[in-house]
Image (spheres, rainbow, N blue to C red):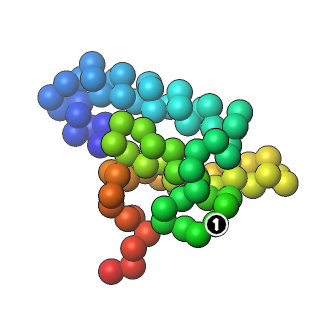
Amino acid sequence: QIEYIARDKPAAAKKFKSDLLKRIREIPEMPFVNRKSIFFDREDIRNLIFKGYIIVYKVDDKKGIITVFGFTKYKENPFDKK
């Protein structure tokens, strides 16, 4: 998505990327502050909503690991098996 934005508005793409990375880096501070995933019925998988996108991540509290699965536009389900 950043590449798409960058074609027309390079400065906007740079800011989008910077803001997104900042939000992702904040996840370990309070990993459960974001809502439970709309794609998975599990407490350890969360959704970070960011500028019309959903960043899906898993929290492994025992190991202290956050795994980011990816991100998609809001309302799309990348995990839907079609």
Q: Of residues 74 and 79, which is closer to you in this image? A: 74
Badge 1 crowding class, 10 Å Cα cut-off, few under 14, some 14 to 19, many 20 or more, is: few
Q: In percent of the image, x 54 and y 59: which residue is there?
A: 37
Image quadrant where residue 30 sits: top right
Q: In percent of the image, x 58 and y 69: which residue is there?
A: 41
Number of numbered discs: 1
Q: In percent of the image, x 31 and y 37: which residue is there?
A: 2
Q: Name the residue furthest right.
A: 62
SS under mark 1? loop
What type is the residue that disc 1 sits on? Arg
Q: In percent of the image, x 33 and y 80: which residue is there?
A: 82
Q: Is residue 18 above or below residue 35?
A: above
Instruction: Classify residue 23 as left or right of residue 52.
Output: right
Q: Is residue 64 above or below residue 45?
A: above
Reading the image, the residue beneath label 1 is 42
Q: Position of residue 81 (x, y in %)?
A: 39, 79
Q: Name the residue furthest top.
A: 11
Q: Name the residue furthest left.
A: 8
Q: Is residue 41 above or below residue 24?
A: below
Instruction: Classify residue 30 as left or right of residue 62.
Output: left
Instruction: Classify residue 63 as left or right of residue 9.
Output: right
